[in-house]
Amino acid sequence: MIIDCHGHYTTAPKALDDWRDRQIAALSAPGTGPKASELKISDDEIRASIETNQLRMMRERGHDLTIFSPRASFMAHHIGDFSTSSVWAGICNELCYRVAQLFPDHFIGAAMLPQSPGVDTKTCIPELERCVKDYGCVAINLNPDPSGGHWKEPPLTDRHWYPIYEKIVEYDIPAMIHVSTSCNACFHTTGAHYLNADTTAFMQCLQGDLFKDFPTLRFVIPHGGGAAPYHWGRFRGLAQELKKPLLQDHLLHNIFFDTCVYHQPGIDLLTRVIPVDNILFASEMIGAVKGIDPETGHNFDDTKRYIDIAAIDPAQRHKIYEGNARRVYPRLDAALKARGR
Amino acid sequence: MIIDCHGHYTTAPKALDDWRDRQIAALSAPGTGPKASELKISDDEIRASIETNQLRMMRERGHDLTIFSPRASFMAHHIGDFSTSSVWAGICNELCYRVAQLFPDHFIGAAMLPQSPGVDTKTCIPELERCVKDYGCVAINLNPDPSGGHWKEPPLTDRHWYPIYEKIVEYDIPAMIHVSTSCNACFHTTGAHYLNADTTAFMQCLQGDLFKDFPTLRFVIPHGGGAAPYHWGRFRGLAQELKKPLLQDHLLHNIFFDTCVYHQPGIDLLTRVIPVDNILFASEMIGAVKGIDPETGHNFDDTKRYIDIAAIDPAQRHKIYEGNARRVYPRLDAALKARGR
């Protein structure tokens, strides 16, 4: 099986955008916003939005299953307040659940949280519980910077985040550390903010001792870990200066990198530097980079092609494609086994 | 010759720290701060601080010359106002000049600027001029985020920065894009903020068309370009989506990456992905990572060892070690030729 651990519902029907626009427009006039129930999207519309996009490309590329979450750049936790994010997260998570219901062989949900800048993370727990219990979500996306590029929340090692960690440890689900759109003009969303957040999250974990408090907590750092694998020597050296254990002991029981690195040399570095047990197949398709690479004639984000020819053996490739995902996402493994897979 | 384009005076005598502490302590009581003339550091002290540190290691490693600038993390442009930064930059630049005078075969200066958050960049010009004309500086360090991790200045493509670009184009000197210490708890200075700034600067240039306005402007992006080379496919794809030319045409006449990447696989990726004409040898020694890599028995930052065995030919290696630096830093080349080198 080939499991893509990182897909977003970037192709949702336009009614979703329109609803969100109305919600945002109403922020200055409380009480005038649309109700969640005013959003009408039919199963046929959802089916079409998936069949002609993600599912078509999954079939072309040979992916079997995608862990599917709401569009990352649209989480936009900086907009409005907790109630804004709460209604929005509820809507987006329900849509991904409907995708998973309509295509149970191909999609399974990961939840976005109703984060809001400066708000107690306990407020995210009810939506998180609902997504796991009612929607069968196997992971969450956790935004380390709900301010959208201003980085005002404390580091991920701070107790601010512990209520979420306690809950996901209880449920035994991992968190993908994934920011949303940047509203800081310095940071292009997918070209700078995403990668910076990955690097930042990794270094925050390196500086701290979070996994002493939560030995079974698991973070997936997307986009190939930002700059971390490329600068692995730097990080090994910084860990040494900070009197931390070796990275494999300090972080690699708990941190995993996906393969959203869109060229062969990047994937080759990733598989050379990072232990194969810590690499999870992903494409983030359809996402930041949709085009065809003129150097290869294939989509930049067709990451399976890079892994297929990376210098690893079949057993290692199996781990990246399937084995590691089943281990890191035990609820995914259970859901697959329940369907005889 | 082996030219290290990225060294900072991280080992300056303690009197410098003490003076800076007094300057900072006096910020709340204007007029009570120390005068620049109160800082007393003898030539012998400078000599000792260099001979036992950078110069000793340069000799051990076989580096001939270092382009030497004030300690990056101590620029701390977020502290105080323009007058604070102005006095501080003046002191730090003078010290590097004295190093270059004492060891003219081994060090040549690059200037820090008296940047201050929100202040017109024109205010940096007098110090810049002084450093080039009086101190023979061959480059500047430009901080894209003088707020120290809050990123409140506009992107590098904004006209805010043009006064500096006009001056360095006139002088035909490059700017290394280098942030200073992070005062944002989210960002470890050397493990996150530096790398993020490199990635951010690269993406800002990719998004914009700065080099249409300044065809001869040259940026050195340190620390191996942050995440850029590892994610080169992502950036090629983003350039395509943004309807920009190919990266080699859009950016690589003007952007250069140094080799401060502290392990062999990282350097191998850099030399595989980035055209050799755009790679400049550097170690940032003595800097962020001082330790010995237990996997190799050598210093993490002994980057010459990685380049010596990278899969490039002698002519390419010569470019990385010397040829490119002479081209990117023409005032360095002129200074070397004036000394018969």
Image: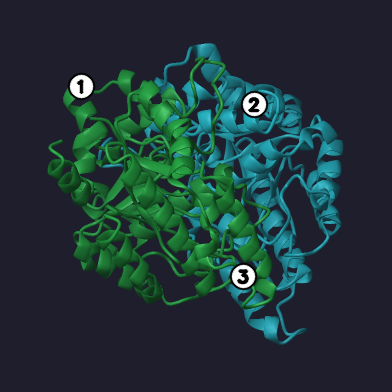
Chain colours: A green, B cyan
- Crowd class of label 1 (few under 14; some 14 to 19; many from 20; radius 10 Å): few
Q: Which residue is mark 1?
A: A313
**Chain of the residue on which disc 3 is drawn:** A
x and y, in percent, of residue B219 in the image: 69, 37
Front residue of this view, candidates A114 and A282: A114
Q: Kindly identify the residue that appears in the image at 57 percent across and 41 percent down.
A: B222
Inter-mark Cα distance, 3 to 1? 55 Å
x and y, in percent, of residue A78 in the image: 57, 65
- Crowd class of label 2 (few under 14; some 14 to 19; many from 20; radius 10 Å): some
Mark 3 and mark 1 in contact? Answer it, CB < 8 Å. no
Q: Kindly identify the residue that appears in the image at 20 percent across and 29 percent down.
A: A318
Q: Kindly identify the residue that appears in the image at 32 percent across and 68 percent down.
A: A164
Instruction: Name the kind of residue labelled 2 in the image.
Output: Leu
x and y, in percent, of residue B299 in the image: 36, 41
**Chain of the residue on which disc 1 is drawn:** A
Inter-mark Cα distance, 2 to 1? 33 Å
Q: Nearer the viewer, mark 2 or mark 3?
A: 3
The secondary structure type at the circle numbered 1 is loop
Q: Nearer the viewer, mark 3 or mark 1?
A: 3
Instruction: Name the kind of residue labelled 3 in the image.
Output: Gly
Q: Which residue is mark 2?
A: B247
| Disc 3 and disc 1 on one polypeptide chain | yes
Mark 2 and mark 3 in contact? Answer it, CB < 8 Å. no
Visible residue check, residue A308: yes
